[in-house]
Amino acid sequence: MSTPSFAVRGREVMATLLVSSIAFGCAGTSGATGGSAPTASSRGTPSVGPRTGSVMVVGGGQQGPEVFAKFIELAGGPDALIVDVPTAGGDSIDTSDGGRGLKNAGARNVVVYHTTSRTVADADSFVAKIANARGVWFGGGRHYRLVNSYAGTKSERAFQAVLDRGGVMGGSSAGASILGDYLVRGAPSNDNRLFNHPQYLKGFAYLRGVAIDQHVVARERLPDMHDSLTSRRPDLLGISEDEGTVWVVRGDSAEIIGRNKAFVYNGRDANDAGRPFLTLRPGDRYNLATRRVVSRAIDATPLTQKFVDNVFASFGDAASGGATVLVAQGGKVLVSRAYGIAVQRRFTPETGAPNFALQGLSAVLNAVLAPDSTGRISAASVRRVTGMGGTQRLAYDSTTKLWSGTVDDLYRFDQARLAQSTEPKGFGLDTQRGDVTQVVYGSGEGRRLAWVRYPGRKTTIIILTNDDRFDAKAAADRIAERLLAR
């Protein structure tokens, strides 16, 4: 398969041309509309992120409990007044169900804030209901609706006031993109493949000089930011995140949390090889003003990427069949690496595609299936498993009753299942170096595949290969011995 081109796709060329007179070379205007890239103040005043308070940028899809828990924490706790803004959802909005995710996570004081009337959005009586809010959450849908309803009104100023008093601003999917300065995919239509629209270029700018995209792995959007925007706007910092993944920003400092990957365009570190972006993972920290990685989650552990690369050195040749490995600890992803796997379509991470036959690891997934009274596995039961954690490519074969999947999806499932049970079914029990472990392998001899959990250490190691001779158990043991050295 050939490496995808960085060229602008045909249907986006017209939109890009339309904005050329607006978006290029407008010196003297604020972040998203031209001028040089912002730099950190010598006094330490944030130049990109909020001067007070916090911003949470969520990539859409299913959010784990860690996402809303962090939002509630930053708002000041369960009793803080939190504003749920579902307006981007359009006709699908059910205001009676507003703020469900926040309420399920423990928020006790949630107000639904919604109107499609700019007159209402500009009314003192409407704005008064959120005068003491400590958090604002923008839901998903189409972000042009947020612009139409609130941009330039007293409501928008009331949202900004939440940050000014030290609160938190957050949103998922469309509610993530609106948090940026330059608004991507803002076209007033349901065709969100249109990246730029001349009348919808300005977000609410809680992150100045930043453009934000979302759903980028699930919807194969990874080249779009470069192709349609950042390659022509070096002043703009582009950030994106996959589903269930979050940028938590305080000042100019950001940390990635959640279950998958985030991405940076126009950063000052080297991009990933052959790609127009740099990949970050949960636990990594980034400075939005200097546009550089501050630290990687693995840096604080005895494990190194070089050590892991050595464990999988035999997979450097594509003829080996390929391998992927994911190592996580305490919600931080230390390693997520592929070996001997070709570049995937539209830069989908090789840890997220292609699928591997899961063989014996299927036992963990099958343990969640619920057969009906006749013993049949229904499509709904399969969907329950594939929906656990927001998996994207996990697949079930009803004939063999086996699964195929990726390390990224198994980690999503792992985190969701752990939230429900500390002793998930399908694993065997073992003791290694005094630690009780939950283990399952591709075969009884520990070959080919390994899924090893150290619940007492909050550590997960997942190894997938296409080599029946590979000792996956020994590989997982080597990684654990280095990582968990006492």
Image (cartoon, helix red, strand yellow):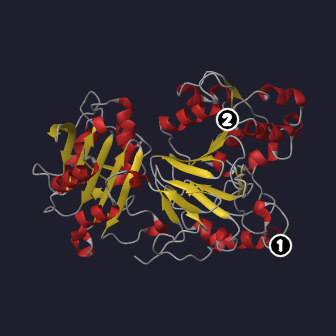
Query: Would you identify the image quadrant in which residue 52 lies?
Result: top right
Q: Is residue 356 visible?
A: yes
**Residue nearer the viewer, 445 or 267:** 267
Q: Name the residue: 34% across, 62% down.
A: 305
Q: Name the residue: 53% across, 26% down.
A: 104
**Residue nearer the viewer, 380 or 287:** 287
Q: Which residue is mark 2?
A: 93
**In the drawing, does residue 253 fall left or right of residue 259?**
right
x, y percent for residue 461: 28, 49
**In the drawing, does residue 456 fall left or right of residue 202?**
left
Q: Name the residue: 28% across, 62% down.
A: 307
Q: Is residue 426 above or below residue 323?
A: above
Query: Would you identify the image quadrant in which residue 27 lies?
Result: bottom right
x, y percent for residue 90: 71, 41
Q: Is residue 372 above or below residue 336?
A: above
Q: Is residue 310 above or below residue 126?
A: below
Q: Which mark sits nearer the N-terminus, 1 or 2?
A: 1
Disc 2 on helix, strand or loop?
loop
Q: Which residue is mark 1?
A: 21
Mark 1 or 2, which is nearer the eye?
1
**Residue nearer the viewer, 462 or 367:** 462
Q: Name the residue: 80% across, 28% down.
A: 131
Quarter placement of the N terminus:
bottom left
Which residue type does callout 1 highlight?
Ser
Which residue type does callout 2 highlight?
Ile
x, y percent for residue 222: 54, 64
